[in-house]
DNA sequence: GACTATACGGAACGCACGCCCCGGTTGGTA
DNA sequence: TACCAACCGGGGCGTGCGTTCCGTATAGTC
């Protein structure tokens, strides 16, 4: 188990790959060819695989920090704010981030450790909000995940119109209003 | 431009392909390999391409009738019902259909003539509903399309849980409530 | 029954992409 | 400086899929 330190060039390339992956995933999502990331980093695909066993592993390495920040922030607020505000605030923050970071959208869908964490915190916040009547009682965690994933995906796919912060705000407004309930 | 009549076997195979495509697209969406449809029809891939120049053309041939029924129904009702009921009724009907017909979801996304028609009627109904205050005034047609597409896609992708009529009803309840507005 | 245009089917092509292999290079060390 | 292990790069493999090609079969006609 003794971890040998990486050679200098290996260490440098690892950073280059991570940086490139961060940019490219944010711009184009998980779907981009890995070769594009390698090219952006100025290395060959083989080098990428030397550092990350799989494309998913690289993706996870990139989004983990991002998601964990969001989750940590949400868990902090959960104590201070009222449950409704905590839940809807979290949704709003997700929406804002997702506009410029396409990979965040995929982070909800692509199986990984952070995905579970994200789903978990969503469930906690939602149940809290349901307890105080801020969210319809008949919804399950999976429902919110599906809605969120769907809205985010729709935001990006859209062959109609650009991804703008305004549209994202509008869509999340609709989503939030819907989750509050009072309609059918 | 004189249309020669098809040979008997060609005509029969055309029907077989359409029937198979209808079933397979409904079950698995546009993403299914075309070979699967050919196999189901008991013909070779080449035969499929003799009748339809492209996979998208076949898809369009399959969903056109389906979508046009929905659209025609919506346009009829638009005169009888009040605009709000017409719009939300249309959404509900879409949701019901989409549960068992995965291709309907893709029909919203894959570029085609029916897609435009579908978007158009959605826009008309929505503007009508907005005029009587049944839908938030700040929404554009594209917003509804994105939301609809997203919710439907989420409904199917879901690596969590099955696609049930109950969940669909719940999600469309949330969507409808959100579109009515009154929240942020 | 013979003849031909028409249609069939499935092997094969082209492409994209995830992933691996290996000849060549380079950083660290003595 | 000389050596070796670690590392690099990109060509290549395997797979999946849309699409095409072509030798063979068959429906329609005389």
Image (cartoon, coloured by chain):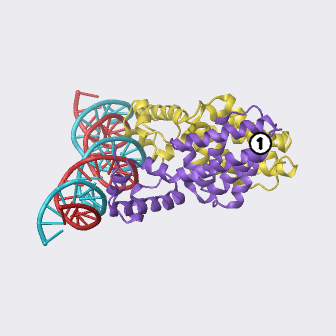
Chain colours: A yellow, B purple, C cyan, D red
Total tally of numbered discs in the picture:
1
Image quarter where the N terminus of chain B lies is: top left
- Residue C5, given in percent of the width and then of the height, sits at 22, 53
In the rendered image, is residue A166 in sight? yes
In the rendered image, is residue A69 in sight? no
Residue at the disc numbered 1: B83
In front: A123, or A181?
A181
Neighbour tally class for label 1: few under 14, some 14-19, many 20 plus, Cα within 10 Å: many
Image quarter where the C terminus of chain B lies is: top right
- Residue B169, given in percent of the width and then of the height, sits at 72, 56
Kindly identify the residue that appears in the image at 78 percent across and 49 percent down. Answer: A126
| Mark 1 belongs to chain | B
Relative to B41, is B174 on the left or the right?
A: right
- Residue B135, given in percent of the width and then of the height, sits at 78, 39
Kindly identify the residue that appears in the image at 54 percent across and 44 percent down. Answer: B114
- Element at label 1: helix
Relative to C18, is B98 on the left or the right?
A: right
Relative to A49, is C30 on the left or the right?
A: left
Kindly identify the residue that appears in the image at 68 percent across and 36 percent down. Answer: A95
Kindly identify the residue that appears in the image at 74 percent across and 46 percent down. Answer: B86
In front: A3, or B175?
B175
- Residue B172, given in percent of the width and then of the height, sits at 72, 51
Residue A84 occupies quadrant: top right
């Amino acid at each position: 188990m003794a971890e040998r330190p990486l050679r200098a060039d290996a260490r440098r390339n690892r950073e280059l790959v991570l940086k490139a992956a961060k940019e490219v995933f944010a711009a184009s999502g998980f779907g981009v060819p890995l070769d594009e990331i390698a090219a952006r980093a100025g290395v060959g695909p083989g080098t990428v695989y030397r550092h990350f066993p799989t494309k998913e592993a690289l993706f996870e390495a990139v989004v983990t920090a991002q998601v964990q920040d969001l989750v940590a922030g949400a868990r902090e607020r959960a104590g201070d704010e009222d449950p409704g505000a905590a839940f809807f605030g979290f949704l709003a923050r997700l929406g804002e981030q997702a506009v410029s970071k396409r990979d965040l959208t995929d982070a909800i869908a692509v199986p990984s450790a952070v995905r579970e964490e994200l789903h978990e915190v969503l469930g906690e916040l939602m149940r809290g909000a349901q307890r105080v009547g801020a969210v319809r009682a008949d919804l399950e965690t999976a429902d919110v995940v599906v809605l969120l994933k769907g809205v985010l995906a729709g935001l990006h796919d859209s062959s109609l119109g650009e991804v703008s912060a305004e549209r994202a705000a509008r869509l999340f407004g609709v989503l939030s209003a819907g989750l509050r309930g009072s309609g059918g």
